[in-house]
Image (cartoon, helix red, strand yellow):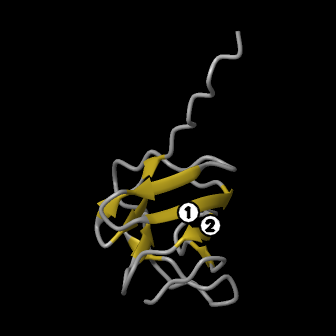
Amino acid sequence: MHLKAGARLRSQVDATEVIVVRAPTGEAVVSCGGHPMIDPAAAPGTGLAIAPGSAGTLMGKRYTADETGIELLVTKPGSADLAVDGVVLTLKEAKPLPASD
């Protein structure tokens, strides 16, 4: 799937919904809980289960993968992990602000 900034996606296995903040170059498959994410208006597949060992997502947090350059903003949290082309996304850390002594 070719992603672009501003695209909305939702999980097929839990409540997770995201917005693409920074899209990868080229084609990429964004998955949640081991299954591809879909358009919010699309119907999810039946009989799908979350992959074991998922830590979940947090509301309002950004998840990234340096290998692909993607950045996703979670708009609805869930219990499954986000991944792009099989690479699990990590929580983006806030940049420390300089001291103003």
The residue pinned by badge 2 equals 18
Alpha carbons under labels 2 and 1: distance apart: 6 Å
> Of residues 17 and 92, which is closer to you in this image?
92
Specify whether residue 20 is in view.
yes
Name the outermost residue toward the top: 101
Q: For label 1, count other residues whose C-alpha is less than 10 Å away and answer few (under 14), some (14-19) or many (20+).
A: many
Specify whether residue 80 is in view.
no
Residue 30: image location, x then y, percent? 43, 74
Residue 45: image location, x then y, percent? 50, 85
The residue pinned by badge 1 equals 72
Contact? badges 2 and 1 (CB < 8 Å): yes
Apparent side of residue 20 relative to residue 3 in the rendered image (left or right):
right
Residue type beneath disc 2:
Val
Dividing the picture into quadrants, the one containing residue 27 is: bottom left
Provide the secondary structure element on which disc 2 rests.
Answer: strand
Q: Which mark is residue 32?
A: none
- At horizontal 64% and vertical 17% (from top left) the residue drawn is 99
The quadrant the C terminus occupies is top right
Q: For label 2, count other residues whose C-alpha is less than 10 Å away and answer few (under 14), some (14-19) or many (20+).
A: many
- At horizontal 43% and vertical 63% (from top left) the residue drawn is 33
Mark nearer the N terminus (2 vs 1): 2
Apparent side of residue 68 relative to residue 8 in the rendered image (left or right):
left
Residue 3: image location, x then y, percent? 50, 84
- At horizontal 31% and vertical 73% (from top left) the residue drawn is 85
